[in-house]
Image (spheres, grey):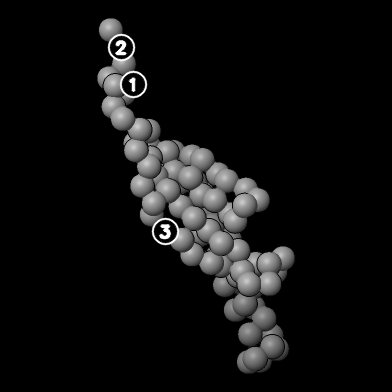
Amino acid sequence: MPDSSSTRPYRKKHVIDTVINDESCRNGREITIHVDSLGMMNIAFGNSMTIRTDADGLRELQSCISRAESELLSIRTVEENTCGWPC
């Protein structure tokens, strides 16, 4: 018996376009995100790289980014406490 997922039409939905700061791009790095009917997400970083992952991969990526953000905030707090504001 054929897998029911193979009979469903493939669909892709645009989620967001944004631009983030990137030291290697003068006007920032374009980010485009799509989801599809196969349960995958595509994150395109300009024309240079694309990540295709599922919900588990997305959660892991979110966790990594959140941890990096915490580290940046921690470093900023230490700098503010040791050299005054602004550093």
Q: Which label's residue is closer to the chain start, 3 or 2?
A: 2
Bin the neighbour count of mark 3 within 10 Å (Cα to Cα): few under 14, some 14-19, many 20 and up: few
Q: In this view, does 78 lie to the left or right of 18?
A: right
Amino acid of disc 1 = Ser
What secondary structure is found at the residue carrying circle 2?
A: loop
Amino acid of disc 3 = Ile
Instruction: Identify the image quadrant of the C terminus.
Output: bottom right
Q: Where is residue 19 in the image (x, y as percent from the top left)?
A: 53, 67
What secondary structure is found at the residue carrying circle 3?
A: strand
Mark 3 highlights which residue? 16
Q: What residue is at 49 percent from the left and 39 percent from the top?
A: 53
What secondary structure is found at the residue carrying circle 1?
A: helix
Q: Is residue 72 left or right of residue 40?
A: right
Is residue 84 depicted above or below 50 in this figure? Answer: below
Q: Which residue lies furthest to the bottom in this view?
A: 85
Q: Where is residue 60 in the image (x, y as percent from the top left)?
A: 49, 46
Instruction: Identify the image quadrant of the N terminus.
Output: top left
Q: What residue is at 55 percent from the left and 44 percent from the top?
A: 51
Answer yes or no: do the residues labelled 1 and 3 have beta carbons within 8 Å? no
Q: Quadrant of residue 2?
A: top left
Circle on res. 6: 1
Answer yes or no: do the residues labelled 3 and 2 have beta carbons within 8 Å? no
Nearest to the observer: residue 33 or residue 79: 33
Answer yes or no: do the residues labelled 2 and 1 have beta carbons within 8 Å? yes
Q: In which quarter of the image is residue 22?
A: bottom right
The reply to whether residue 49 is visible in this rendering is yes
Mark 2 highlights which residue? 2
